[in-house]
Amino acid sequence: MWPTALPRKASGSACWDRYINPIHPNPELRREQIDRFKEHLRFARDFGTSLVATETGSVQAYLEAYPDSTEEDRWSLLRSAVKEMVEEAEHWGVYAVIEASQNEVVRTPEQMKRSLEEVPSSHFGVLMDPVNLLNAANHDRRSMRS
């Protein structure tokens, strides 16, 4: 339940984390989570921020439910969810951002770039935590560039 009254000047934060699984294998739970994220976008300014972040969805959970799914199946679900969340962000004048992470749909700098290209909006961005992009195959590289 949201508070009925907030201080005139909230203390603020750089970003409000509302980590959901936008490709959740259960469509009803996926819808609930996306709607909850959109609610956070609506109230972000009341809590002193204009950024609301999420990760991009558990590949493992989706593969357990749909073992024959492809990378493009998961990408399509994510793109659809992100477009919907970004439309909401545009409406409220705030920003929806995604964070790449290993074992998620977006897990490389190239995929981050693709997401930005496929959802072109000034109200959409990425939250960059380079440590989330490290894995056994690339941990010894000094640069994340390919």
Image (cartoon, rainbow, N blue to C red):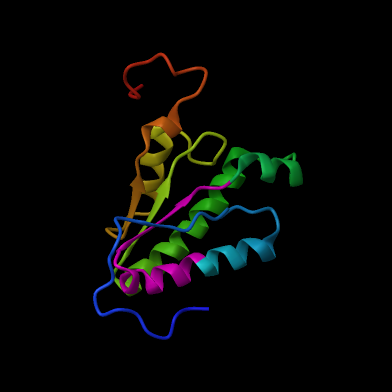
Give the residue drawn at x 33%, y 51%.
Answer: 125
Decide if residue 10 is on the left or right side of residue 3.
Answer: left
Q: Position of residue 75 (x, y in %)?
A: 54, 46
Image quadrant holding the C terminus, namely top left
Looking at this view, name the residue that lies furthest to the bottom. 4
Q: Say if 36 sits above or below 66 in the image.
A: below
Q: Say if 5 sits above or below 48 in the image.
A: below
Q: Position of residue 31 (x, y in %)?
A: 61, 66
Q: Say if 123 sits above or below 3 in the image.
A: above
Q: Position of residue 10 (x, y in %)?
A: 28, 71
Decide if residue 40 is on the left or right side of residue 95.
Answer: right
Residue 69 seen in this snapshot: no
Looking at this view, name the residue that lies furthest to the left. 9
- Residue 46 or residue 80, whichever sits in front: 46
Give the residue drawn at x 25%, y 80%.
Answer: 8
Q: Position of residue 143 (x, y in %)?
A: 32, 20
Give the residue drawn at x 33%, y 24%.
Answer: 145
- Residue 12 or residue 112, whichever sits in front: 12
- Residue 133 or residue 71, whichever sits in front: 133
Residue numbers of the magenta segment: 37-57
Q: Say if 106 sits above or below 24 in the image.
A: above
Residue 78 seen in this snapshot: yes
Looking at this view, name the residue that lies furthest to the top. 140
- Residue 53 or residue 121, whichever sits in front: 53
Q: Say whether residue 105 is magenta.
A: no
Give the residue drawn at x 37%, y 32%.
Answer: 130
